[in-house]
Image (tube, rainbow, N blue to C red):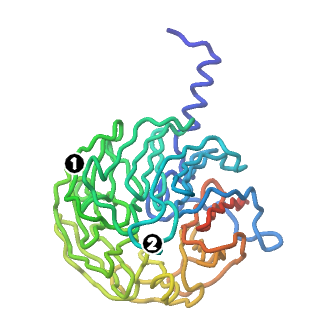
Amino acid sequence: MILPARNWLVLALMLVTFSARADDWPVYRGPARNGISAETNWTHEWPGGTPKELFKVNVKPGFSCPIIVKDRLWTMGHRNGKDTVVCLDALTGKPVWSYDYDALSIGTAKPDYEGTRATPTFADGRIYTISRDGKVFCFDGANGNVMWSADVTKEAGAAIPTWGFASSPIVYGDLLLLNAGAAGLALDKKSGAVKWKSAGTVSGYATPLIYEIGGKKRVAIFGAESINGLEPDTGKLLYSVPWKTPNKINSAELIYQDGKLFGSSAYNFGCAVMDVSNDHAKIIWSNKELKCHFNSSVLYKGHLYGFDGNNILSQGLKCVDFATGKLLWNQEKPTWGNLIIAGDRLILLSQSSDLIIAKASPEKYEELAQCHPIGGTSWISPVLANGVLYLRNTRGELVALDLRK
């Protein structure tokens, strides 16, 4: 059947709308899942000292980052026992669709911090989410229709960790990988059926990390008491490095480069780089220079940039040599926060919601700009997509700032 020209135009527009571009931010930690944006055509020189605000909305309390593909933004929030997944216009903040479902308000620890933990994932026009009590959803990104749902506690026997599931879903081939169970879990991305699973004990909180060794794909899972390397297609365990931290809080993202894997945990535990190039793990160096809580470091041009310590006991921002673990500099303020890197610049969002731009240089810390565009406490990583910076605080306020030149 030959489609009329108008129908072909509509189809073409739909495909363009839901195909991720280089400057989009379709998954947690960005297009390369490393906290680095390839964007360079943005400015830190703001008339009046503050970027132009495109919109500010409330998406309910939680710790989910926004993800952005072209003119659409998706994120999650929580209130009164219900998670809400929202889709907004990425430039105006106007609602496109939302979906509510019953979900755990707090973890098994009390007092707790209310709200969602994981960030949604975009792939092939679909949005994948997980609640802190293990409810997984697959949505049609355009209209919010539920394609399928699953519960990893019931269907895979995965125990809910103390602070709730926090791993963002990762699409790998036909699989949806989650940090659930002792060393991960894989669901069929088209149906939600369990494809492989590990022991049902509590998990860590970091998102699975896909990397490649000798042409073979691998996945690293930061467990509650170990760092694990697996075959992502089968779940076969290749190595497991003991990593026993206070309260089993392993939250910061693992980082991979050239056969080496970096891990870090807070509460005076420390960090290490290990050689995983032969599907075994051998520690190259370890120290306590970077003790990352749930705010992950970023590896850029051979150097790690990250906040040392937790939200209460912090040593500030540090730059550490990836090859040796040597501390290159330590900036005491901002004391704690989250960061990404774009255009050779650090984009920092402090715990007190200060936006700071600084040079990404191992030589020294050099601040370029600072403002306070959002109030409250922020424990959420900034997001840069298509020249727009998105910042969110824990009470659900989301602001979009125009950094386009």
213, above or below 26, in the image: below
Residue at numbered disc 1: 196
Q: Residues within 10 Å of mark 2 (few under 14, many from 20)?
A: many
Residue furthest to the top: 1
Label 2 or label 1, whichever lies nearer to me, is 1
Q: Residues within 10 Å of mark 1 (few under 14, many from 20)?
A: some
Q: For the C terminus, which image quadrant?
A: bottom right
The residue under the point 59% across, 88% down is 333
Looking at marks 2 and 1 on the same chain, the residue that comes earlier in the sequence is marked by 1
Report which quarter residue 78 is drawn in.
Answer: bottom right
Judging depth in this view, the residue of 283 and 87 nearest the camera is 87
* Secondary element at image label 2: loop
Residue 356 is left or right of residue 240, and the answer is right
The residue under the point 24% across, 44% down is 195
Residue 201 is left or right of residue 345, and the answer is left
Report x, y in % for residue 138. 43, 41
The residue under the point 43% across, 72% down is 299
Report x, y in % for residue 132. 42, 59
Q: Are marks 2 and 1 in contact (CB under 8 Å)?
A: no
191, above or below 34, in the image: above
Amino acid type, mark 2: Ser
Amino acid type, mark 1: Trp
354, above or below 134, in the image: below
Report x, y in % for residue 242. 21, 76
The residue under the point 43% across, 35% down is 147
The label shown at residue 112 is none
Looking at the image, can residue 134 be seen?
Answer: yes
* Secondary element at image label 1: strand
Residue at numbered disc 2: 296
Looking at the image, can residue 345 be seen?
Answer: no
Judging depth in this view, the residue of 306 and 133 nearest the camera is 133
